[in-house]
Image (cartoon, rainbow, N blue to C red):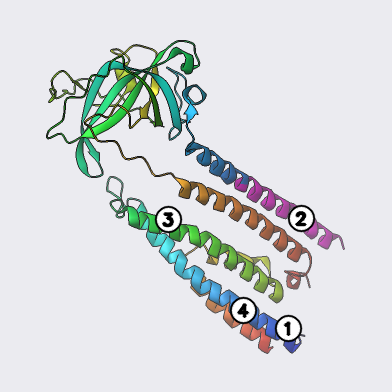
Amino acid sequence: MPSSAVRRIVIAVITVICMGLAGVLGAWQWSRAQHQGLAIDPIPAPIHEVMQPATLGGEPIGRTVEVSGEWGSGVALIPDREIDGDKALLLIREFTVAADVTGTGESATLMVLVGWASPEDPAVPADLAGVPATLIGYIRAGEAPSPPGVPVPSPAVDGVEFALAMSPAQFASSWPSPLYTLVLVSPDGTGLYTELPFPEPQTQLRLQNLAYAIEWWVFGLFAAVVGVRMMRDNGAQEDG
Amino acid sequence: MKSSRDDRSVRASLKRYQVMAVITGIFLILVFLGVALEYPLWPGTEALAAGSPALLEFINMIQFIHGFIYIVYLWVAIDLWTRMRWSLGRLAVLVLGGVIPVLTFVAERRVARDVAASLES
């Protein structure tokens, strides 16, 4: 019967399309799960594998990296922030990444967020200029430069610059270039300030994508089952 | 014509579907409530659950579990659909029943009624 043959072909084509779609969506979730798994890798990677100086890129945010070099003289405080609901003053430092670890052959400057303090009574940050160090921390995004014309409050701590934003772009004019465009959060160099809470690993997110991948593939299998049933006897009432 | 043995297996399949429909229906309403809490109801306002990480985590867990419950629901729904030799339109109602809140319960009532009618005839 030609009409039933046509019906079968149509069902087969639709089934294959549905399975393909489910397969692709599953693969997409699978790759997202892998990607996010990579992003929270607790094993520190050498910095040159993760980012290059003066190069934009949001990929390595959340990656743990290891970097050696020495502290620079630059220190700045960022006012009006909050850490776990407490008002906070963030302390950032200039770090000179050694030429042999940048991957470019020349040294570069990295903005490092080392800690925070209550704005009530901030300590004078220790001068670490020239002190060699190897930092292990994680990458976070830099902030946009603060809009021009917004008054910067006068420093509460003698000799320390205040900045409204943790923006490598803004510091590029005063700190030695090339500057990394992302910020390292490190528990080293914290001194009298308080270490920042380490973000909880986002394993749940990864598991979620993994589950979505499996769910899509199961949906694909269901499409196959339904397709086969449609070809056999489901919907036969309409024909007969 | 169906033997009484077929009737029994259809009844068992219907029972499985009904149990899963109730569970899925409840979870679906929870998922929608969760979404309403997780995202701002009005642009510029803060989401109702924004201040509570524990609540957000709970909402996330509900969504996560719902995914798997929906798979089991689909499995038993396809099983019943196959046994009843229903058309594709009925399958669409069953599939959507796990996605559109309250429709789950409406579909469940209708399916139970139709299966009962078909077994009696």
Residue drawn at the location 33% of the way across and 32% of the way down: A187
Q: How many marks?
A: 4
A13 within the magenta span: yes
**Would residue B61 appear left or right of A222 to someone viewing this image?**
left
Q: Nearer the viewer, residue A190 or A32?
A: A190
Residue drawn at the location 37% of the way across and 41% of the way down: A199
**Would residue A231 appear left or right of B72 to someone viewing this image?**
right
Q: Are marks 4 and 1 in contact (CB under 8 Å)?
A: no
* Residue A61 x/y as whole percent: 43, 32
* Magenta-drawn segment: A1-26
**Would residue A58 appear left or right of A74 to someone viewing this image?**
right
Query: Would you name the residue on which mark 3 appears?
Result: B60
Q: Chief secondary structure of the magenta span? A: helix
The image quadrant where one finds the N terminus of chain A is: bottom right
Q: Disc 3 is attached to a residue of which chain? A: B
Query: Would you name the residue on which mark 4 appears?
Result: B14
Question: Alpha carbon of mark 3 to alpha carbon of mark 2: how far?
Answer: 37 Å
Query: Would you name the residue on which mark 2 appears?
Result: A12
Sequence-first disc among 4 and 1:
1
Q: Disc 1 is attached to a residue of which chain? A: B
Q: Secondary structure at mark 1?
A: helix
Instruction: Point out the residue furthest to the front here.
Output: A132
Question: Alpha carbon of mark 4 to alpha carbon of mark 1: how far?
Answer: 12 Å
- Quarter of the image for residue B121 reads bottom right
